[in-house]
Image (tube, helix red, strand yellow):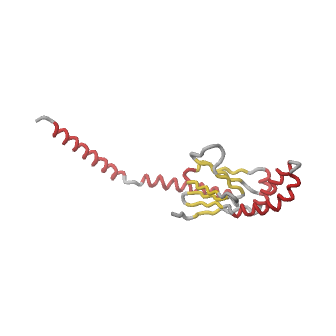
Amino acid sequence: MSEKTLVSAHFHPKLGLYWLVSGAILISVSVVGIPLLLIWFPIGLLATSRYIANMSAELTEKRLIVRKGLLTRTENTVPLDKITDMALIQGPLMRLFGIYKLTVETAGQSGTGSLINLVGVLDVQAFREQVLQQKSLLTERQSTVVDNVDIDQLLLENLQQMNATLQRIEQALTSHSPQ
């Protein structure tokens, strides 16, 4: 039962460079880390490009599906009706690269923080808006389905069941009553 993909996210071309620079800053903080910078950039460049190649985010009619990982690959599937918040976060280094982090929080999620973190989605505001719009459409459709149920038919069925129950009770009472 495969759903049609409405939107696929694409990732910023500078995302790998952002991760490399972030790691280099952390490594540079320690004196021992400075020599590690010589191996950090070649290995980091290869690892980040492979990681980004494995990242995907797809919006379907009912779900948001996020896949990522290098050694351990994960796939998170979030039903749109469970999404409670989608926040955009941009730190100082992210502003320098023009990158945002999109966080997705859901109803019933355990623990603090977000269920999904997507860093570096191109045109992230439009992607977020499309997810929220599809969530609204889905919610409207579900409420319309409930409203369109033939209420008269349900009432008629309930009355028929009540009538049948009353007839059974009446028969039981007449058969047990002394004559």
Left or right of 144, for residue 83 = right
The percent position of residue 129, horizontal first and vertical second, equals 63, 56
- Residue 61 falls in image quadrant: bottom right
Q: Residue at x 71, y 50 (%)?
A: 89
Quadrant holding the C terminus:
top left
The answer, for residue 126, to whether it is visible in the render is no
Q: Exactly how many numbered labels are in the figure?
A: 0
Please tell me which residue lies in front, 84 or 25: 25
The percent position of residue 39, horizontal first and vertical second, equals 84, 59
Please tell me which residue lies in front, 1 or 164: 1
The percent position of residue 36, horizontal first and vertical second, equals 85, 55
Please tell me which residue lies in front, 12 or 171: 171
Q: Residue at x 88, y 55 (%)?
A: 35
Left or right of 122, for residue 141 = left
Q: Residue at x 56, y 50 (%)?
A: 82
Q: Residue at x 50, y 54 (%)?
A: 140
The percent position of residue 98, horizontal first and vertical second, equals 76, 57
Query: Is residue 51 shown above or below 88?
Result: below
The answer, for residue 10, to whether it is visible in the render is yes
| Extreme residue in the left direction | 179
Left or right of 1, for residue 114 = right
- Residue 60 falls in image quadrant: bottom right
